[in-house]
Amino acid sequence: MDWVKTVCLVLWVFTFNSVADDLKEHALKLMTDTPLIDGHNDLPWQMKSLFNNQLNTVDLYKLNSTHTNIPKIKEGHISAQFWAAYVPCNTQYKDAVRQTLEQIDVIHRMCHKYPEVFKFATSSQDILDAFEQNKTASLIGVEGGHSIDSSLGTLRTMYQLGVRYLTITHSCNTPWADNWLVDTGSEPEAHGGLSDFGKQVIREMNRIGMLIDLSHVSEKVMNQVLDISEAPVIFSHSSAYSICNHKRNVPDDVLMRLKEKKGIVMVNFYNDYVTCQKTADISDVADHFDHIRKVAGSSIIGFGGDYDGVPRVPDGLEDVSKYPDLVAELLSRKWSDEEIRDALGRNLLRVFREVEEVRDHQNGTKPDDIPIPFKEVQNSCRTDFGYQYASSSTCIQSFYPVVLVLTLLNKLL
Amino acid sequence: MASEKVVVAPLAIKMVLHNDLALRLRMHFKNKLSNFSIHDNSNFATDIRRLAAGHVGGQVFAAYVLCTAQDKDAVRLTLEQIDVIRRMCTENPEMELVTTAEGMRNSTKIACLISIEGGHSIDSSLPALRMFYQLGVRSMALTHNCNTPWAESSASLYPNYQRKNNSLTDFGKAVVNEMNRLGMLVDLSHSSWETARSVLKHSTAPVLFSHSSAYAICNNVRNIPDDLLLLLKENGGLIMVNFYSSFVACSHNANVSIVADHFDHIKRVIGAESIGIGADYDGAQGFPKGLEDVSKYPALIEELISRNWTEEELAGVLRLNFLRVFQKVEKVRE
């Protein structure tokens, strides 16, 4: 009877593989009719770290030291990607702005260098257009409020340069917002969430149509932003706190509020945020999708892999070519086609459109030009031009004529 | 009758000049445009009413930050100045932001062009330069009153980056190359003569002096000696004459006539087609009698006509020479 067992085993394996193949095929089919929009990829940072942004020396078709390259993007069916323009926290109060411009520039150049693959995008419509053309829509997200150096003018000009989301903090407080480390106790809270200027930043982002990204912020900031933002908000690369209680993840009560606000949480694949351990697999990531769906429904879910921004990714999701396998895993957990399509891209498109509508609705309002109070931002690298003359503080005013003359002398010669 | 005809012809020609109103906005209003009336503001030399009175159709607004911000927050400050200029030019229906020669030519409003006044604004970063271009900046002065790590200023007010015999470094040449490639005007006002000389030899596109006058008439280092004027002619570039009294008369007493002397001299040396107007209003205090603000330009035109400048020459000075140079710079990009 051994031969019967063997035949049964073979049949079972064959069926299993068949089913797996079917699921994968099903996943791929869904991904050809609905764009996969990933919320966060740090390839630009790899360009900086590995090549000092010398793109002319890199071939993105052949690069194999990163999670991301062109063949893998194609295999992964990534139809739209928010590329992170990230600079480390130790540039804060130094040259963060210039370095951020350099990251924005490298993303533009990447798109320019491979026009057959990437289409630079700045709107929900651009994403759809790129999808029609079978290209990967490339958007920019600036990762960390320190990149704007407490300047609304800088925020606006970065928007002009195509930036479409700002992550309010990276892993450091700004002069106007607290980061997630505050919730771990390893860093002192500075603002109890957002300062008044922080609220100005949020309102200005609503006005110009910039997506507000709450990955990396403290819980108080999450809640305060959800209180005041007129537009839906995003978490570009965060997972579920209930599954893995890492402070980079989103607690259930915030997920519920996000649902009310019609926002999106784009699930991060980093092992440490998925299992709270150094190892993980594709099933663990799918658990986050399942949990968020259970708590708040599939309308707030998306993909935010964080590829090339983290050192450890799950087995089965080793690089950006593996998204279809994750979709297949969700299908095996009885996610419907509609739920998958929502998670792939429809949720993000909804959020983006709503943010654009809030912007268009506010078209008549003037830009906010009230600067951050100087004492909140004073540091050795910051000059105070403009503050001296318009300030009503008596100490500074007494120097006004002298300083004005000196300034003019300098300017005229 | 002659003077009436003179006033009518330039009405049709809109002028293009250099203006530091944005600096004033930061200094006096912290860039809070809401507190400032651009239509009528007696604190400054520029406002829409007077631009219209002066028949100014095109204005290059300088996004300028002081040299003391070099190696500090110059980049951020520059972005803020660009933002305030964009806002000024898009929030007022009489003004229009342009970024091409054609845009400037065809505009029916006061056309604004953004420039940067000093290479310290790019913090020695070609990506920053490129991003400024994308924001609409179409001209950059390589230095203001301070040296950059890669170019020298005509002034020695600041100790930064002083050096001998290396007025334009290899990186400086790379900056010029990138500006040529992008189609950004290279402005040599404020640069040292040696830097200017190197650039005039290296640049593949015409360059300009956006607000400098003739050294032969007034020997101030901000002015341009005849030999550099000749190199400029070869390059196909433009010198836009500064009106500031100390530069035109080498004293605080100046008038329309001495300004016209500069025009006459430069025309004699390299021809009227190389000349423009770069008054520098709001960038200084101390302008000639009769040319106190942007509404007074017609007085200069009348003086030049009385010195037998032809309508064609004047049309060039007022506008067409600048547009021609700008167009050539765009061609080099292509």
Image (cartoon, helix red, strand yellow):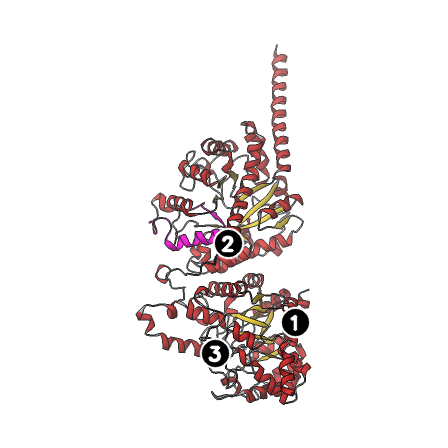
Disc 2 secondary structure class: helix
Q: Nearer the viewer, residue B107 or B144?
A: B107
Q: Position of residue B293 (x, y in %)?
A: 51, 79
Whether residue A211 is in magenta: the answer is yes
Q: Are marks 1 and 3 on the same chain?
A: yes
How many residues crowd mark 1 within 10 Å: few (<14), some (14–19), many (20+)?
many
- Label pair 1/3, CB-CB below 8 angstroms: no
The image's mark for residue A208 is 2
**Lateral position of residue B150 relative to residue A260, left or right:** right
The amino acid beneath tag 2 is: Ile
Q: Name above or below for residue A318 compared with residue A162.
A: above
- Find residue A91 and report its image quarter: bottom left
Whether residue A191 is in magenta: the answer is yes
Chain designation of label 3:
B
Magenta part of the protein: which range? A188-216
Q: Position of residue A206 (x, y in %)?
A: 48, 51
Which is nearer the N-term, disc 1 or disc 3? 1
Residue drawn at point x = 33 percent, y = 45 percent: A185
Seen as rendered, the residue at the extreme left is A395
The image's mark for residue B205 is 1
